[in-house]
Amino acid sequence: MTVTDSELETPMSTTPQLNAVLKGLLPDAAVNKAFVTGNVSMNYGELHEAVARTRGLFARFHLVPGDRIALVTGMDIAVSQLYAACLMSGVVAVVIDPQASASEITVLLAKAKVSAVFADTAVIDRASTLQSDDTVPIVPVAPVGKTKTGFGLLIRKKAPAVSDGSYPGLLVDESPVNERPDFDNDAPAQMLFTSGTTSQPKGVVLSRKNLAAQLLTFESQYGYDANSRVGNHLPLHHTDGINQGPLLAMALGSTWIRPGAVDLQTLGDMLDLLQRERATHLITVPTVIAMFTRLPEVYDDSFSHSEFKFVSSTAAYLDEQIWRTVEARFNTLIVNSYGLTETVMEALYCGPDDDTRRHGTIGKPVDCQARLVGDDGVDVPVGAVGELWLRGDNIMTGYFELPDATAEVLTADGWLKTGDLATAVDGYYTIAGRKKNVIIRGGINVYPEDVNSVLVSSPAVAQAATVGIPDAFLGELVVSCVAPANLPANDSLVNELMALARVELADEKVPNRVLVMDALPHGPSGKIELAKVIQAATDALGGAVEGGSARDQVLAVAGKVFGQPVDVLSESSSSDSTEGWDSLSFLELIMGLERQFDMAIAPRDVMTLKTLNDAIGLVENR
């Protein structure tokens, strides 16, 4: 798509506006107004006090602007307080998945070169690096309690302890810091990793300008203001979770509605919460939107209250049929968007205004510039496929201490090569494929190299190739094909590799399936032919379990879905007792049973399915 100079002159936010956004964080709001409500709660008065005392703790740790601290905790309030304190002190927040494996955490902390770590006790217990580190403060994070005394122990080796107690309990002894100094617009503010261990871990550095530009675009495009009550259940180690959750609320003085974990069985509870709290918006991912179609009819009016504006779909491809179906059934608007961690969050918007909205597309660029470029570096003609390039105030400063990797994706004149292929017609962009090697499962990026490296670490595996298989509900399934080191393959190899993956990888990266092949297909140059691997994986996934009673077939389907030996499953198997049974795999189980038995499982039955015995009963009584 040819782009003219005039088309590239997209209005950008002015420097004074950008400076004001983060300096004005936590505007003076009524002390009793809710900052976060739902699964956890805190008002703005409590948040102001906690942030000021956290800044006092930073001062005692001798943290200075530009220092990096790691946040490795599932405590939402703690992350919010620490993140706000970082932004007000000029300290860079490095947010890491608390469910990451010990090896992943070790690599990411080493890569980030942090000056302090705030981590859940469970994280400290399983990550030997944290236990042995004697160079930085390691602060345990505990749930917020009702008392004003500390919890546990502050670990700081080779230095005097600041106070007994874990965060945030130890803040009772801290002196508040309330000054709001000026920081350079281009100063780093946040670092999020786009990959884990074996592929080169890339720390995306986002500046204060990047964050401020994104917030200003949200205000203008989505109409967010102090009266917004935004539901957002996404994890805080992802940009759409932390920056469109607590940061958005703190910047506007609005309310963040935080549900608990969301899956098929708790989705109705989330919708009930949003209605009780009079939510104005819901931020979610396509997989959860697809789950809406599985809800009983009683939930059809979930977005009918007058304050509700729209559902925002982010992080992955939104199937057009599901998009239209959910909008029609729930009588609500779904706004689709496109972005990357490298663009803070969103860069292209499909709605809510009519000018950017067209079903099946990712809409149009807003407050940034877009172009489609061919392999020859020249803009492609209208309607042709090209790589999507973006430029604007929302583009990252680069990958932390990786100049070569940064130069591969950022041009000298500021264009970000997204690695996604797209077309553009009438100004509306549509994703057509992907150049970069990443699988998006349920809105989560999974890098095949991370998975392959873990699998080939087993002496029983000669080669591994991990691919994404399209799925209407999950976006893509993560399927790993392996060639054994010796033939015939051990019958238990799949189970052994799934167990290995669960130890070495974060839950979200564990393959949906591991398939054993005598040999992986190779081309004349010796490279693995991924197209043939994808075809073989697609064929294998399509096959039904053969024969046996209803019980045997249900257990066999569950074994494939959860990556478990059938002999460890039983009628009493549930999410509490079964490795691999999570919100996404539960959805897979439902769809697998429907395919196996050529049946439709009613939404009311989905909501009551707690054990495999419930599934067996559904099949036998169909």
Image (spheres, rainbow, N blue to C red):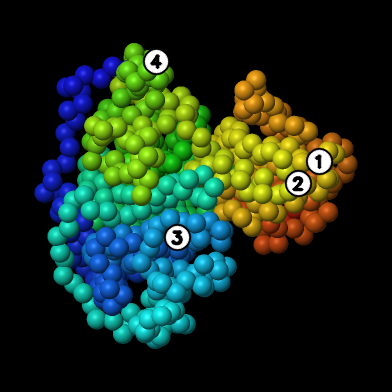
Quadrant assignment, res 144: bottom left
Quadrant assignment, res 39: bottom left
Question: Residue 465: x, y in percent?
Answer: 64, 36
Question: Residue 397: x, y in percent?
Answer: 29, 44
Question: Residue 351: x, y in percent?
Answer: 32, 34
The mark nearer the N terminus, 3 or 4, is: 3
Which-is-in-front pick, marks 3 and 4?
3
Residue ID for mark 2: 460
What SS does tag 3 mark?
Answer: helix
Circles 1 and 2 in contact, beta carbons < 8 Å: yes
What SS does tag 4 mark?
Answer: loop
Residue ID for mark 1: 486
At 28% from the left and 55% from the top, the residue drawn is: 189
Q: Where, quadrant-wise, is the C terminus in this rendering?
A: top right
At 33% from the left and 67% from the top, the residue drawn is: 81
Q: Rounded to the nearest whole Å, what is the CA distance between mark 1 and mark 3? A: 37 Å
